[in-house]
Image (tube, rainbow, N blue to C red):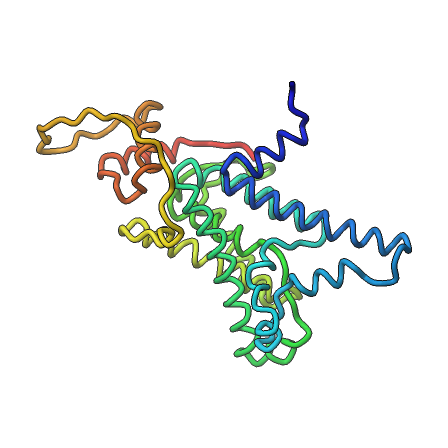
Amino acid sequence: MKKSWVGDLWHKAFRSGSPLYLFIAINILVFVGLSLLSLITALGFTDIHLAGYLLSWLQLPASVSGWLYKPWTLATYMFTQQGLFHLLFNMLWLFWIGIIFLDFLKKRQFTFVYLAGGIVGGVLYLLAYNLIPVFKATAFGTVMIGSSACVSAIVFATAALLPDYTIRLLFFGNVRLKYLALAFIVIDVLAIAGLNAGGSIAHIGGALFGFIYIKRLQNGQDWSRILGRERRRRKLRVVRNETPSYEEPLVPNQEVIDRILDKISQSGYDSLTKAEKEALFKASKQGQNEY
């Protein structure tokens, strides 16, 4: 029997094992749930603002006392969005850059960067609103929702790993990831003086975490290992006793890149040889996607 499109989406989100589709699905379901609750109130079925009540238990308060009363909000805020364009913008960027991230790194690493990036962004937001005088005055009336800090972490992690990877943007043409990330951080720094200062501060926190995580990963430290090891199928390998005295440069054709990506998925980026890293770098400069 042919599956329905709803069944296909459900399988991709919750059965495929992809953290990218899972996180997008959670964000969308929370948004739809809040929207339905708003509709129930708007149609007069209840005088209680149901969406507002639920939102109060999901959003991250800026004051430390408010957060201590609801400590779980440091996790729930990053899956909560209001406004269709807010959701659409974040999910599109998460999908576009997340696909590239998962082409080169592990699912576990994606999960870690998304969650830790959101937590770091939330912590920086809390610190700013409780230590900086201009923000401290408004802390008790300020809350934050949205996955932008998580998305920033994924964008900057991918840009740090593949700075010369090129994507094609509408109206802008071919853009390297390092320039895209630079534009993001400049906009967020300037926006601190605007109405969404807390959101911009959280974006910067997520971005810094994503960048630092990749730099530590390239030095052999994979912080995502705290989530445990991924299951992987064992493969038979032919082992040769002789060890070459030097590495010949690798031609970055499809066969070579597939072999390198398979090695990354099994042992991580830091297990690559110098020649393999150079081949991957050359391939990233040639890669183009249109968004």
Q: Is residue 133 above or below residue 91?
A: below
Q: 253 or 120, which is in the foreground?
A: 120
Q: What residue appears at the point 54 percent right and 56 percent down from the top-left corner?
A: 149
Snapshot quadrant of residue 283: top left
**Residue at image location 40% in from the left, 54% down from the top:** 211
- In the rendered view, does 236 fall on the left or right side of 207? left
Quadrant containing the C terminus in the rendered view? top right
Report the label total.
0
Residue 198 at x, y percent in the picture:
59, 66
User: As drawn, which residue projects farthest toward the top?
Assistant: 1
Residue 186 at x, y = what percent?
Answer: 52, 57
Q: Position of residue 103 (x, y in %)?
A: 42, 35
Task: Pinpoint residue 41: horizontal percent, then vertical percent.
Answer: 85, 56
Q: Is residue 273 left or right of residue 64?
A: left
Question: Which image quadrant for residue 213?
Answer: bottom left
Quarter of the figure with the N terminus: top right
Relative vertical location of residue 1 with respect to residue 26 in this rendering, above or below = above
Q: Is residue 205 left or right of residue 221?
A: right
At 69% from the left edge and 50% from the top edge, which residue is drawn?
Answer: 31
